[in-house]
Amino acid sequence: MTIKEQILEMGASALKASRQLSSLSTEEKNSILLAMAESLEQSSSDILPANKLDIAAAEKNGLTSAMVDRLRLDEKRLAAIADGIRQVASLPDPVGEVMAKWQRPNGIDITQLRVPIGVIGIIFESRPNVTSDAAVLCLKAGNATILRGGSEAIHSNRAIAAALQSGGESAGLPPNSIQLIPITDRESVQHLAEMDQYLDLIIPRGGAGLIEKVVSLARMPVIKHYDGICHVFVDSEADIEMAVSITVDAKTQKPGVCNALETLVVHQDIAQDFIPRAFAELHKRGVELRCDEQSLAISGGDGVKPAEESDWRAEYLDLILSVRVVNDLTGAISHINEFGSQHSDCIVTQNPSRSERFLQEIDSATVFWNTSTRFSDGEEFGFGAEIGISTDKLHARGPMALRELTSYKYLVRGTGQTKAQ
């Protein structure tokens, strides 16, 4: 069987499964999810050795420490993934929600009802927990899923997908509701993206190259998860201790993720006080700083590098931070809107009017006041596990969870009305 034939067969199976899934009750879906969580934990003896194979290959291939950490699983992380599944089971089911209801003058009743999308393809890189997050969210929203993970996590992904499907089937999950493409050949991406007879939506999660390729090939709607070039702007009226704490957390708590801080923007009136204190804390944590002329001069050049133009558009996903001093709030907003990726940006200030202006004028999916960009996350928003963070503006924006994995249809009820009347 060719790769194309294999993908088409998976698509046909997923479509059949999606029609069965759409008729499951909330209670049935929740029972399936709980069985999947239990199966995942019971399969640790298969999943963790598989993950060790991926970790060994990643280290041999020279992946950064941050990327290796994104791949790594242990008992604690596996338990957290299982807990995430249970959390999704506890969330309200969006399917069947009446979004609006009204009656027309001719007596026709119209109901707008939330329904599953159908079959969703998800292409992702690195993090094996995405296999579970994507599958369980799609399932709760009544969708079948075809997953295509990266080669760096192939062993982990296979083991996780097998545990989820087998555990779910024991509680009534239709066969082929969760399918993982078992090969890493790039040809599979093309065939998946072109399979519009079976696939209703495709979501690529990864680098810009992957996303651009999927967008160029896709014959169905695409929800994009582009770069996370996130900013913190320290205003002249910021509490310095708070600003240092937020900066350090946003950059170093987990540097290899899309909501980590990549560019620090500082008001010139606070720069002399803030920069030395912030840089000292960042140095302690091994952060490399790439500074514009003003921040370089304030730091004294100790342990920092001059920034290049490319640094303002860089998603480092590592312990590297670019720093720029601006004249005022207007300059900060201008810089962020020009160089950011419309993902997650923060202002630190004690001035409410400035914060409100920042919140309104920054054109990003999530905008923060006095809190770390690391909270740009479906779980932190109370959505449970997330499918990703969309930087699109149509259908879904920001952390994507259950509601964003549904569509809607109109139910129109009459009593014999005709257009000719």
Image (spheres, grey):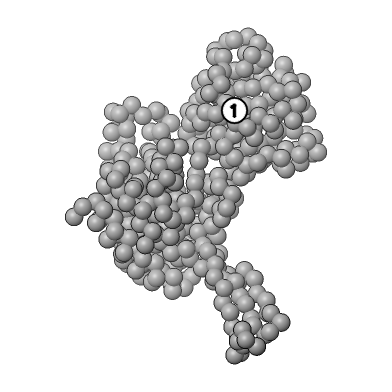
Question: For the point 32% across and 51% down, which residue is it?
Answer: 191
Amino acid carrying label 1: it is Thr
Residue 42 in percent (x, y) is at 32, 55
Where does residue 86 sit, x and y in percent of width and height?
47, 58
Q: Position of residue 291 (x, y in %)?
A: 60, 18
Query: Does 3 sit left or right of 18 as displayed?
Result: left
In this view, 93 is above or below 1:
below
| Residue in the image at 44% along x and 41% along y | 212
Q: Position of residue 287 (x, y in %)?
A: 53, 22
129 relative to 44 in the view: left or right: right
Name the quadrant containing residue 196: bottom left
- In what quadrant of the picture does the N terminus appear? bottom left
Residue 95 lies, with reference to residue 279, above or below; the image says below
Please, which residue is most extreme toward the left here? 1
Rendered residue at 71%/82% (across/down): 105
Q: Is residue 267 visible?
A: yes
Which residue position is annotated with label 1? 263
